[in-house]
Amino acid sequence: MGSAATAAAAGTAPLVAQGTSPSPAPINLPVKMKVNGKPRELKLDPRTTLLDALREHLQLTGTKKGCDHGQCGACTVIVNGKRINSCLSLAVMHEGDEVTTIEGLGTPDKLHPMQAAFIKHDGYQCGYCTPGQICSAVAVLDEIKRGVPSHAQADLTAAPGATGEEMRERMSGNICRCGAYSNIAEAMADVAGASA
């Protein structure tokens, strides 16, 4: 049985149909965007996600690849002031956009208030989800400030408040496998000046 399988495998033709040539290599497209305040120009395969462009082409590895299906939030970045899952978005879709990653929020010498609050309230354990959690938390407080409604509001016409329930609802797309949710809520409340 083994020799028959070997003979069959050895005798198979290449996957290119007879009379055709192999598919040409993908064409790389130019993409210009501002990343963390700096203009960047890349030439990318049009199938490259924003996540892979950031990590593999710009070496901004703070943004993490978790599930790669938009379910965990580890890849959350801020694009034109709104948070997105960068694993679900193609880089070529962001021509001219402003992208902020965890590296663009603060530096070790000058932390963003949310980064400092995460440290103060121990809003991380293993730290893998933390960059996405922080980017999302920053954007959540901005959403609340701009009056963007959420499912947690009883009255969608009223201005949302930075309540614990409101922030938890908005952060529900960011998963922490270590379970540091209460600490994350405390960090957000500290920055928002609200009660967690």
Image (spheres, rainbow, N blue to C red):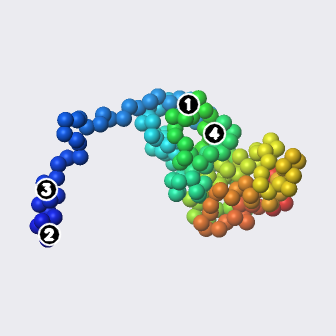
Q: Position of residue 196 (x, y in %)?
A: 81, 62
Up the image or down, 56 lies above or below 133; here it is above
* Residue under pointer 2: 2
* Residue under pointer 4: 79
Mark 4 in CB contact with mark 3 (< 8 angstroms): no
* Residue under pointer 1: 95
Q: Is residue 75 visible?
A: yes
Q: Nearer the viewer, mark 4 or mark 3?
A: 3
* Residue under pointer 3: 10
Mark 2 in CB contact with mark 1 (< 8 angstroms): no
**Residue shown at 69% from the left, 39% from the top:** 81
Q: Which mark is residue 151?
A: none
Q: Position of residue 125 (x, y in %)?
A: 61, 65
Mark 4 surroundings within 10 Å by alpha-carbon count, few (fewer than 14), some (14 through 19), many (20 or more): some
Mark 2 surroundings within 10 Å by alpha-carbon count, few (fewer than 14), some (14 through 19), many (20 or more): few
Counting the numbered discs, the total is 4
Q: Position of residue 71 (x, y in %)?
A: 58, 57
Between 13 and 123, the one nearer to me in the picture:
13
Three-letter amino acid code at the position of disc 4: Val
Three-letter amino acid code at the position of disc 2: Gly
Between 79 and 14, the one nearer to me in the picture:
14
The answer for how far apart the CA atoms under marks 2 and 1 are is: 54 Å
